[in-house]
Image (cartoon, rainbow, N blue to C red):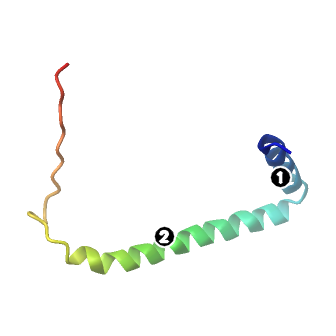
Amino acid sequence: MPLPNELVNAFRMLRRSPGYALTCIAVLALGIGANAAIAILAISPVALYVPLRRATAVDCTVALREE
């Protein structure tokens, strides 16, 4: 079956069992949140040792082209 038909069928099955749908959404949200938290905790010690020119200011450079 083509992908749009598969998506319609998946949403139809989730609509028939709202408890299962809420459980799936909650598990996905917890998984994504835990993954983001672990990534932040893993990257933060590395970010402390990155040499910056000015650690207190963030430089934003905007390149303007004349056309």
Q: 4 or 10, which lies in front?
A: 4
Q: Which secondary structure, mark 2?
A: helix
Check residue 10 in the rendering and tell me which mark sits there, or answer none: 1
Report the side of 35 relative to 40 (left or right): right
Tag 2: Cα neighbours inside 10 Å, few (<14), some, or many (≥20)?
A: few
Report the side of 55 relative to 40 (left or right): left
Q: Is residue 44 above or below residue 16?
A: below
Number of labelled discs?
A: 2
Q: Position of residue 32 (x, y in %)?
A: 57, 67
> Which picture quadrant has residue 45?
bottom left
Report the side of 16 relative to 42 (left or right): right
Separation (CA) of disc 1 from disc 2? 27 Å
Q: Which secondary structure, mark 1?
A: helix
Q: 62 or 58, which lies in front?
A: 62
Which residue is pictured at 82% across the width and 50% down the height?
11
Q: Position of residue 26 (x, y in %)?
A: 69, 67
Which residue is pictured at 15% across the width and 52% down the height?
59
Which residue is pictured at 17% across the width and 44% down the height?
61
Q: Is residue 15 above or below residue 19?
A: above
Badge 2 amino acid: Ala
Query: Looking at this rendering, what residue extends furthest in the right direction?
Result: 16
Q: Position of residue 66 (x, y in %)?
A: 16, 22
Badge 1 amino acid: Ala
Which residue is pictured at 83% across the width and 52% down the height?
10
Check residue 36 in the rendering and tell me which mark sits there, or answer none: 2
